[in-house]
């Protein structure tokens, strides 16, 4: 939660949201243990300033959800973008923290995401060695120190221009056992794609070599199987990113999510109002010039939630092995 | 169905599957009208030759789902890859044809996909003007004739080498009204991503400018709103690909799907058997050197199914407007 | 909410729970209108006295859920029965109030439940004429004044003996249009049954003539169709209780729910502890000798929720009639 | 399947439906083992005579689903009642057979249903001792030989009058372990109720003492806990029918389903046509005078399906105990 919240430094929004979580149910207050009850958590918003949004009530901010929500519901919430605000991701990160714990305790699964690209500046990161400590050592959450500096400079440049930048978050999950993911529709690839493409500002998703795989031949892309000394099967390369036929194969899971540049600009933009009048609009308020650093824990949370779900489904796929 | 089936030419598998659809329920045989009953369709497999798969029963083909299915279920179907075979997409295309009809009849929505890239050769296609006729005029289903020739040559080259190639399918949906897509988890982006990333061999997905959007600044990427003479709101550019905040904005929906090179090679590959023995394996049978031309109707079908679902959900979002 | 809460008189538990509802989302605080966002409501518990439950932590109260929760989860919440407490129905009644409003505004549907039987004393109530005012005029919520007196006496008798009684709630929904309910699994009968049989202490459910219908011949039970002056079709009798083939037929919907006698007795009972020791147990605390009066709004709420769901599904069953 | 099909004797419909099941997927034809794939089965209808239904296309049979289907969909299938025909239960019984197998193999659960009441004639049956052999020894599937004779006579009487009768099926499931069923909405009671009340002609449902429990005091109805020599907890009575707080307690599960008299009469009835004309209608064709004997395997199948579902859910409720 602390890694997601705004106010972490000059790269992110100066809003001060403490994001304190209140657990409403599911955990025994005496023992701290779960009870089997759904775990409900609530995060209040202590620094909302809805008057900042007053003038927005009647106009459609470009590339925001104002117009599309109006089209869908015939009205929309005034303050702060409602469910279209990235503020809703606070709930994903809270839930993801529990999922991460389960995956770590039961399977020693380790999920790490980082900022891999900002404004066209691409990092070089070792998928097997990267840790959250290495990631968080950089204010832009890029563990490649050679790339982090230029990324920060690019974000600062954009902010000075009242402009914004986008980028790519990459994520690995190490230790996922083979056999997770369902055939046909609920492939692990498919459920991860849905989870990531539901994040605000996401525009693209890939697993393994992704779009770059389309430029390889099959003989370059195929991952040969081999056997370890302990008898476990592995692949000698991992172009597939740990998923074959939609099901995990035991190798490190690799994925990436593309985030567009933030839509809120601190410079004049042409747009229209609800009643079809053209206006020029310039944003006020407190907004990130680049969502990438804060998107890192969101991507980790979504990966954890999907994996946790498939951990349970994988067990049900082998009913005969279940305890009686 | 005819566009999906193998045996369409030298670019695709020579298997001869007639893919005749038998409608089991949901349609009145006398009137040809739907009855409200779920429509069940069955497609038999008249050209299966399972002895082709006999030697595969004990080994794990590289980058196929043999190993991962074994890991999941403790066993797997012998013949033809089971549900991991792209043959299952016949059902998607059959269902998609009905969804396309509904979208066309109710909203005049028009869905067109094409092969946009093969083996690194990128086409240039006009998203507003492209039609299925233009697409199908090319055996590789690429409407850019300048690119289609080199694509076909690249596929032929790969086949001669016993190798395979991948590529990118792009798809547009024209005429989608504003307001389709749900907030938070079931964004139109998210549901399209899941649908496409459930297709066999898919490795990446993007909407609008996708990964390329990450290299634009907000001021370049934002789509300004304006008003048409008839009072309808539109955007003067369409970097968003018709979706903002996860909800359609009335502009042309644009998406792309990356397909890896086919895993079945007609050259020797190293792998292991179920009982951990290393073997050298060379495929026999009838397989596509490139799935892209046949993936075109699959992408269209999945787009139609997702849009159809959200057409209904959009209606429910405005209960008060529903007939009584 | 006021009709469900305890502390309404000597027939119900003396617990004083104010049951104030806090709306967390979904309603615009300025306009009071819904926003399309899910409506989240929270009801705090201001009069919980969990020390009353301390001695229960280790023993299994007869015919309570203590033992079965332990069997399911390996542990259970100490205070107040957790989700097995009828206190959870506060959420159903809050949600049901919104569903009732929708049904009333859109279709003029009118839902009325009443206590029809207590301890074997059966009321005679006119399903077409009964109103909530008539029901609430009686402290036992039985609109048949001849039966209400003996019912109250039976409850008082039981309380004096430290004992409890059960009974039957009947419910009508007037104005449900024909065509609600889905074939096969989600019949209106089926969904109403599930909703009612999920209420705490429910033991039986019936629609129309229910169990009594089994003693009629088809010629006595069938409801002949006829036509009104305005051209609308109706049935001249209503043994079916407004549902035929699982779908509403426009007649008054009639159902009943059987509630067992309350399990909490103020007299000694034999039972065992978690560690298998026999004990004699006598309840303390504040409990209803009879849940029936408070069950009335619960049954109405569940009926409203099921009908609201099928109102939407019925619209989707006629896609072609939906606005575009 | 053989127990459900018509043509079993003079008590049931003389239609000759062989009800042969064709397994389409999910089972390896070589080994006969399941593959993890969904098991699809198909049963053709070899004795349909749709001309029998021709004259029905325009009129609404009383207490059938003709009118309500028209109201829902604006049209309906002509032949044989479509999904409102009890013929659809063939699929339930086929699926139930697999569920029964799983329950028997994994937990030695034993499900037996019988006809407990026909036309007001009530049987006396020992819930612990009854077997399917005892049930099937009687053509009316009532194991109480003293009651079976009068039941058969009542059915014969009704048939001679062109009339029909209803009744009650009771069912037990022995060996269900404690802990099955979910809190709040998906109680075992609730899911069983939905399953049974989705059966054609069902009008009522109860568990344990059901409606009769409402006439007991709590001190009579509560089931005291005690401990067996082997340390297992049990209840010395079983008024609860094996379910407490919606979750199984290890005792024999007891439930009942009320079936109304069959709606198809071989005597004149008043009704109306689609275009609002009054007509007199007399059924032809082949119909059961009493569905009860054939409902026995349907009730068993639905019980098995619900229990199987909750078997899996119970496992997921104890994640920490699952194999890794």
Image (cartoon, coloured by chain):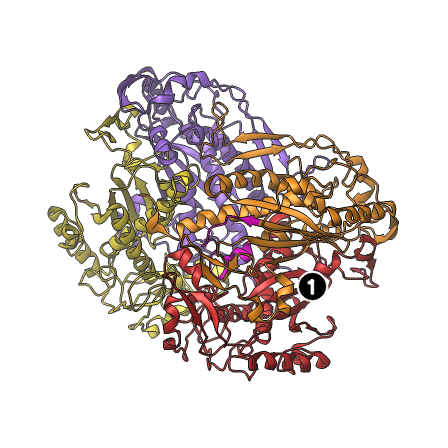
Chain colours: A orange, B red, C purple, D yellow
Q: Chain of mark 1?
A: B
Q: Which residues are magenta?
A: A173-191
Q: Let me know if residue A179 is in the magenta part.
A: yes
Counting from the top left corner in percent of width and height, residue B241 is at: 72, 61
Disc 1, SS:
strand
Counting from the top left corner in percent of width and height, residue B230 is at: 81, 63
Q: Is residue D189 above or below residue D151?
A: above
Between residues A115 and D199, which one lies in front from this camera angle? A115
Between residues D78 and C260, which one lies in front from this camera angle? C260
Q: Let me know if residue D126 is in the magenta part.
A: no
Q: Is residue C93 left or right of residue C322?
A: left
For label 1, the residue is B253
Counting from the top left corner in percent of width and height, residue A13 is at: 77, 39
Between residues A128 and B66, which one lies in front from this camera angle? A128
Indicate the quadrant where residue C192 lies.
top left
Q: Is residue B323 above or below residue C23?
A: below
Question: Would residue B107 be visible to someone looking at this image?
Answer: yes
Which residue occupies 28% across, 44% down? D256
Which residue occupies 61% across, 50% down? A171
């Amino acid at each position: 939660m602390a890694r997601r919240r705004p106010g972490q430094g000059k790269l992110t929004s100066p809003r001060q949201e403490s994001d304190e979580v209140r657990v409403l149910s599911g955990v025994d207050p005496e023992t701290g243990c779960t009870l089997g009850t759904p775990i409900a958590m609530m995060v209040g918003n202590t620094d909302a300033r809805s008057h900042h949004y007053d003038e927005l009530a009647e106009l459609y901010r470009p590339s925001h959800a104002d117009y599309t929500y109006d089209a869908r519901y015939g009205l929309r919430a005034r303050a702060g973008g409602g469910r279209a605000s990235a503020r809703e991701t606070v709930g994903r990160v809270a839930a993801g923290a529990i999922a991460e714990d389960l995956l770590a305790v039961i399977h020693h699964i380790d999920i790490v995401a980082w900022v891999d690209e900002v404004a066209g500046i691409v990092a070089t990161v070792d998928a097997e060695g990267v840790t959250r400590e290495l990631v968080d050592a950089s204010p832009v959450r890029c563990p490649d120190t050679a790339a982090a500096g230029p990324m920060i400079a690019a974000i600062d440049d954009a902010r000075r221009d009242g402009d914004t930048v986008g980028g790519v978050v990459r994520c690995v999950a190490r230790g996922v056992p083979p056999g997770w993911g369902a055939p046909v529709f609920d492939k692990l690839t498919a459920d991860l794609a849905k989870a990531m493409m539901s994040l605000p500002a996401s525009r693209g998703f890939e697993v393994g070599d992704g779009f770059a795989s389309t430029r390889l031949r099959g003989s370059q892309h195929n991952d040969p199987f081999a056997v370890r000394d302990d008898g476990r099967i592995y692949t000698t390369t991992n172009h597939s990113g740990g998923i074959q036929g939609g099901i995990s194969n035991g190798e490190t899971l690799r994925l990436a999510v593309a985030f567009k540049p933030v839509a809120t600009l601190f410079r004049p933009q042409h747009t229209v109002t609800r009643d079809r009048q053209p206006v020029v609009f310039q944003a006020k308020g407190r907004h990130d010039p680049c969502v990438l650093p804060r998107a890192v824990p969101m991507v980790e949370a979504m990966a954890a939630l999907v994996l946790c779900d498939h951990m349970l489904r994988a067990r049900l796929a082998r009913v005969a092995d279940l305890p009686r």
